[in-house]
Image: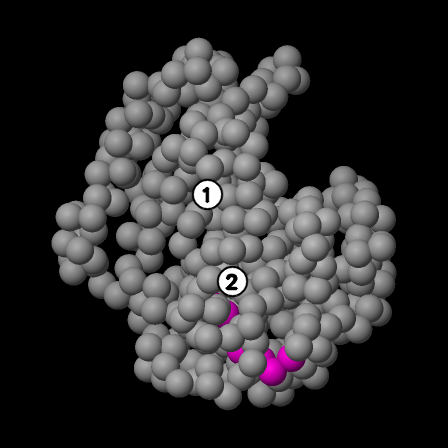
């Protein structure tokens, strides 16, 4: 195994030895994003949490915490926009040919649309699969499914998610892995998404890796997780002899902060390299910026107008959805008469203020930069 990790701003000529840059793991408007992580972040800011809960009281009898599982949002970029954001960084900063693997949550709509647009040679059919496992769930990137079988593969994943059976999971991983161009990646393994506690999360994580190690080809260095989690992933890679690959996890308009460098001409060749144990991850300069500030900027992207939205949902309240007690799905705008609730408007205004070009430099100086990985 040979997993290399380079910081581009320390070694700006590192890309000179390669032909291709690979962007793995990014999201489009086809990705349904849970607001459960929002509840975790709001616990740290009592004032903002109070405002959001006050807005929530106007349309639900449930508590804010209990209702989070019924609310989701979608990122602002259409598939072609997301492809361009990633490709422009690879071409403009690295000077390399781009390969972009978009992996929305439990959906292949974006790559299938891009293939129809004629980008079949550059855009693999990929998905980020939410895999239930005991008392938790993990996100697994399944990259480069055979296009002719992709829909049936998704149907099999959906059936497993609905009725989990661990013996069937091994069969599914084995079937996907049988395609030599397919790459199976354990995304952000140390992120305890359902908040079951660090000790239990790590125990289940290790059980999962040991049980399905034959079919998991790589572990992800995630461009939107902090250096501590990524450092734990580095140590996990050493422990099990598994290569590391990049995963930017872009949801807004900032391009992925982690990429792969390769001389592969297409994704099949790249997957073959990684599966043989070879991977070169390059960390882009935006990863050094304070992670809280990057989260603020991403949140601002989500709650800002999107005049170029691919489905015409220009207002952010059209991109937040709730499954109501009558079973119907309604947008936040519909629930509030197509107006932004006052309490939430205060929260979004605060985030937009923090992203003001005159404010960001001061915040950047005040917050510590992300530490480097070993």
Horizontal and vertical percent for residue 280? Answer: 53, 81
Colouring convention used in this rendered image of the protein = one colour
CA–CA distance between discs 2 and 1? 28 Å
Vertical position of residue 98 compared to residue 374: above or below: above
- Numbered circle sitting on residue 87: 2
Vertical position of residue 78 compared to residue 279: above or below: above
Residue under label 1: 37
The residue under the point 33% across, 25% down is 344
| Quarter-of-image position of residue 206 | bottom right
Is tag 2's residue or tag 1's residue first in the polypeptide sequence? 1
Quick check: is 195 in the magenta stretch? no
Horizontal and vertical percent for residue 21? Answer: 54, 73
Please provide the residue range marked out in magenta. 258-264
Q: Of the residues tagged 2 and 1, which is closer to the observer? A: 2
Please, what secondary structure does the residue beneath circle 1 have? helix
Quick check: is 260 in the magenta stretch? yes
Please, what secondary structure does the residue beneath circle 2 have? helix
The residue under the point 62% across, 87% down is 1
The residue under the point 67% across, 58% down is 119
Horizontal and vertical percent for residue 355? Answer: 25, 45
| Quarter-of-image position of residue 231 | bottom left
The residue under the point 40% across, 54% down is 254
Q: Would residue 320 be visible to someone looking at this image?
A: no
Nearest to the observer: residue 188 or residue 114: 114
Q: In the rendered view, does 73 fall on the left or right side of 146?
A: left
């Amino acid at each position: 195994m040979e997993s290399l990790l380079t910081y581009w701003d320390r070694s700006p000529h590192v890309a000179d030895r390669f032909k291709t840059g690979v962007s793995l793991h990014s999201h489009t408007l086809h990705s349904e994003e849970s607001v459960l992580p929002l509840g975790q972040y709001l616990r740290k800011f009592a004032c903002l949490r109070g405002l959001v809960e006050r807005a929530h009281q106007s349309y639900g009898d449930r508590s804010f915490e209990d209702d989070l599982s019924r609310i989701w949002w979608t990122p602002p970029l259409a598939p072609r926009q997301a492809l361009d954001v990633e490709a422009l960084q690879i071409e403009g900063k690295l000077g390399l040919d781009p390969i972009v693997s978009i992996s929305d949550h439990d959906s292949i709509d974006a790559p299938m649309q891009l293939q129809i647009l004629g980008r079949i040679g550059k855009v693999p059919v990929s998905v980020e699969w939410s895999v239930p496992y005991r008392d938790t769930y993990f996100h697994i990137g399944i990259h480069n499914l055979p296009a002719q079988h992709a829909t049936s593969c998704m149907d099999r994943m959906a059936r497993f998610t609905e009725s989990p059976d661990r013996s069937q999971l091994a069969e599914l991983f084995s079937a996907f892995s049988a395609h030599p161009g397919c790459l199976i990646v354990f995304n952000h393994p140390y992120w305890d998404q359902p908040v079951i506690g660090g000790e239990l999360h790590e125990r289940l994580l290790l059980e999962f890796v040991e049980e399905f190690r034959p079919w998991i080809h790589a572990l992800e260095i995630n461009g939107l997780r902090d250096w501590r989690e990524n450092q734990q992933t580095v140590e996990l890679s050493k422990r099990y002899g598994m290569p590391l690959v990049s995963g930017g996890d872009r949801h807004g308009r900032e391009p992925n902060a982690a990429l792969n460098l390769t001389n592969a001409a297409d994704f099949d060749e790249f997957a073959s390299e990684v599966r043989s144990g070879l991977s070169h991850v390059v960390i882009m300069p935006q990863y050094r910026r304070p992670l809280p500030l990057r989260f603020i900027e991403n949140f601002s992207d989500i709650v800002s107008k999107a005049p170029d939205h691919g489905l015409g949902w220009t207002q952010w309240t059209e991109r937040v959805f709730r499954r109501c007690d009558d079973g119907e799905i309604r947008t936040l705008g519909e629930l509030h008469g197509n107006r932004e609730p006052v309490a939430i408007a205060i929260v979004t205004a605060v985030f937009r203020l923090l992203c003001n070009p005159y404010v960001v430099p001061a915040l950047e100086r005040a917050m510590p930069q992300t530490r480097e990985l070993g």
